Image (cartoon, rainbow, N blue to C red):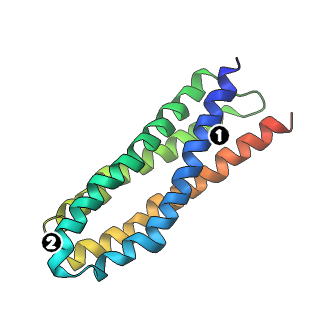
Amino acid sequence: MNWSLTILLANIGSTLFLVGLIWMVQIVHYPLFDDVGEQNYVSYQQRHQCNITYVVGPMMLIELVTAIMLIWYPIEGVNKSLVYVGISLVILIWLSTAFIQVPCHEKLVKGFDPVAYKWLVNSNWIRTIAWTARGALVTWMLVRVLSK
């Protein structure tokens, strides 16, 4: 079994899943938060936080672990610097999630806060752009593998 290719494919699959998800969240889901209404907002935000974790959490872990594993299981035809760029983007996404988006959600779970909401939507572009860049990067890695 070719572990390098298996790891790369798992990394590509998780990353591209997350690229699609983050664009849906950025363009569709987050903008709808301000339309929920005060009466239902807290329960809506609680359900969002709980449910989104089941979707995002496993994929983010798979992406992180496989991105790191690519250091020890190099892909023939893929420059190692691309692997490090990919890991750097994952780290940026995790840091943004932990230090910006999660605290915004923690504020919003107590009730709608227009400042926290605006910061959540605007700062989420960090993750949207980083995941899009990762998507392009892992796609390029696959092209390199397939063209050898």
**Quadrant of the image occupied by residue 143:** top right
Indicate the amino acid at tag 2.
Gly
**Quadrant of the image occupied by residue 37:** bottom left
Judge left or right: residue 82 versus residue 78. left
- Position of residue 119 measured from the top left corner of the image (x, y, whole percent): 31, 71
Is 21 situated above or below 142? below
Q: Residue 82 carries which label?
A: 1
Foreground disc of the pair 1, 2? 2
Q: In the image as oriented, which residue stretches furthest toward the right?
A: 148
Q: Which of 127 and 108 is in front in this view?
A: 108
- Position of residue 126 measured from the top left corner of the image (x, y, whole percent): 45, 61
Could you tell me which residue is drawn at 20 percent across and 73 percent down? 41
**The C terminus, quarter of image:** top right
Could you tell me which residue is drawn at 38 percent across and 77 percent down? 31
Element type at mark 1: helix
Judge left or right: residue 23 versus residue 119. right
According to the picture, the residue beneath numbered tag 2 turns out to be 111
Could you tell me which residue is drawn at 24 percent across and 71 percent down? 116
Indicate the amino acid at tag 1.
Leu
**Quadrant of the image occupied by residue 85:** top right
Q: Is residue 74 visible?
A: no
- Position of residue 108 measured from the top left corner of the image (x, y, whole percent): 20, 67
Distance from disc 1 to disc 2, alpha carbons, whole Å, reads: 42 Å
Could you tell me which residue is drawn at 51 percent across and 65 percent down? 23
Element type at mark 2: loop
Is 100 situated above or below 88? below
- Position of residue 124 measured from the top left corner of the image (x, y, whole percent): 40, 64
Is 23 situated above or below 112? above
* Among numbered discs 1 and 2, the one appearing first in the sequence: 1
Q: How crowded is mark 1: few (under 14 residues within 10 Å), some or many (20 or more)?
A: some
